[in-house]
Amino acid sequence: MATGLEHVPVTPQKQDPAWKHCRLFKNGDRSQLKCIYCNKLFRGGGIHRIKEHLAGQKGNASACLRVPPDVRVSMQQSLDGAVVKKRRKQRIEDEILNVNPVSHELDVIVNQSDVSTGLQLTGVSDAIEPNSNLLVSLEGTGGGERRKKERVRSSFTNAANVDATGGGTSSVALGSKRVNNHVNMAIGRFLYDIGAPLDAVNSAYFKPMIDAIATARDGVVPPSYHDIRGWILKNSVEEVKNDIDKIKATWGTTGCSILVEQWCTETNRTFLRFLAYCPEGTVFLKSMDASDIINSSDALYELFRQVVEEVGVENVLQVISNGEEKYIVAGRRLTDTFPTLYWSPCAARCIDLILEDFVNVDWINAVIEQARSVTKFVYNHSVVLNMLRRHTFGNDIVEPGVTCSATNFTILKRMVNLKHNLQAMVTSQEWMDCPYSKKTEGLRMLDIVTSQSFWSSCILIIQLTNPLLQLLRIAGSEKRPAMGYIYAGIYRAKETIKKELLKRVDYVVYWNIIDYRWEQQWHLPLHAAGFFLNPKFFYSIEGDMHHEILSGMFDCIERLVPDTKVQDKIIKEVNSYKNAMGDFGRKMAIRARDTLLPADWWSTYGGSCPNLARLAIRILSQTCSSNGSRRNHISYEQTHETRNYLERQRLTDLVFVQYNMRLGQMIKSEEQDSIDPISFVGTNVVEDWIMGKDVCVDDYESINWMSVDPPSTNSMLLGSSNDEAEELGSGFDDYEILNREKEGEEKC
């Protein structure tokens, strides 16, 4: 062997078949290859030269005389395949570069770019300079296309001085766009054929799939039907189980909440879904067809008990379900059987019912109906909708909320944010020239949008309901456990109503609505303990802690910590917490009261009070909502209808994988495309705001969906979205709120 050569192992990334028939050496910074059959050393040319050597092709290398015949044949086949790929690639590039662009097609691209990139907002001229990189950024989002655009970027730069009508830059731009459109059409046809929901492209796994295919290029082989239902599903089950095991490993520290969701299918069958929540993520446990037992509290109790035992009673702090009587009875039996856990009604559902009662207040309902008349008119006429989106820079006035009740108030808030844009629209020359402005609905819209009393009423409604909307989002938050905030959120909602309406006779009407729905929650010690253990709120109270909060904290200590010796230690440690002794009083700890999540604060600064800290972390790590998921398209009925046991097991695993993959994306998912309010996906919560009644159509333009401009979001017009929990503030000293005195008053 030549001196100075160092043998280097071939890495797995080198997948050319010729690597199996040679050895790699380093000579300083240079790489050299050696044939394993004839020991010929090649000082240049790379793996392709070795392949020619093994295949017996003369020219760049001498033929190997000792290579086995089968290896020689395989190397020749590999070379032939590379030639075919090279020719195919060259043909595609030639087709792209030889496209003859039509000037109006280029205008369409430029106009579309103005809308999609929000150029109207920046005041940029409609003219696009020939050397602009905008055309490069317009074409597609697929990984393969991005790489191709990077490779041709220099071509755009070199053609910077070519006039757009000369066919230089515009040819490449149009060609690239057509190639990307071909890919997108193929994706669309596939999704349409299988009947997939159109928001499937918002899946966190969609873009990685496209990138993986683009990376594989011509070598990709699509999976078969048996692959998908066989080894791929098996591997996915194992992946999901590994992720779940990591979540379960944290239950010993944080504990978990079991969530019970009930829903009915189109065939009137009732299913129950069981999930387990902790700060690391929500886990789908199983689903049950409960059609025959749903009205039996005894049967529900048995189901609850089984799930608690499967999860481990030592891990469970609470079981959350809706507040119907059958669940209350089952929950009471459950807490009798397991005295170290609580049953809790869903707080998110309770808040939603409060908002629903607010909608039914006469004057609020009247304002909502006025606003609905505007949105129904706008969203059933494409001409008017396009005009609106131009005046609001692509923003919609209909914004889907968490629930139908919440949507009523989020839309009013959105309309107030866009008030001046709406008023500018209905007083513009474009509106006056529009034939729809002369219709009855158009004239009514003009009256409403220019009415000061309408806007004043909207603002007051927003002031009364915004704290409840914030609390609803907190209760079902996917980013932070809600237990430390619910008590403070209800307090702040009532305080805001009192400050807005001033007179007791006025604000007590809305207080009674809240108290009527919240009665079950007031008596839940976990909420009081969560408030007590949240340092942000605890240290903001001047004077003595309210007796109800203290009582709730003591109840949690007795129930969640059965060891009396540990209970006594916790009581002693509570005094250190009250007086901010030791690490609790450090300047860092004081600053962190407002910045760290409550459980993280205890984990960081609670070392001197280990027993209290452990309890605090477990309580503050819990959710308050049984809604463990958003929209889903998973069919549970198919699983329960299958009579073949092997196929039922496969379908059960499929549901297990599907549901847990979606739950896993809820916390770490990036921001996705906003839902178009007139899309089928969003109509479940905005139906009352966009569905027209007996619309008289004079021409097809008013209902032509193809002519509707796509929505976009300009956050500058709508204001920044703040952390709702941070807006709860400090100061809880209104004893009228804490005592909930309603003697002599009628509930609304």
Image (spheres, helix red, strand yellow):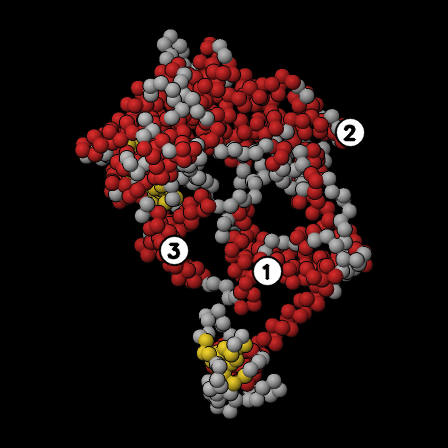
Q: Residues within 10 Å of mark 2 (few under 14, many from 20)?
A: few
**Above or below: residue 203 compared with residue 621:** below
Q: Quadrant of residue 259?
A: top left
The Cα–Cα distance between marks 1 and 2, rounded to whole angstroms, is 46 Å
The residue singled out by tag 3 in the image is 239
The residue singled out by tag 2 in the image is 429
Q: Residue furthest bottom?
A: 65
Q: Quick one: SS at disc 1?
A: helix
Viewer-side residue, 247 vs 358? 247
Q: Quadrant of residue 156?
A: bottom right
Viewer-side residue, 76 vs 689? 76
Q: Residues within 10 Å of mark 3 (few under 14, many from 20)?
A: some
Q: Quick one: SS at disc 3?
A: helix
Q: Earlier in the sequence, mark 1 or mark 2?
A: 1
Picture coordinates of residue 473 (x, y %)? Answer: 46, 32
Picture coordinates of residue 167 (x, y %)? Answer: 78, 60
The residue singled out by tag 1 in the image is 144
Amino acid on which disc 1 is placed: Gly
Q: Residue at x 39, y 62 (%)?
A: 231
Q: Tell me if label 2 and label 3 are in contact, CB under 8 Å.
A: no
252 to the left or right of 726? left
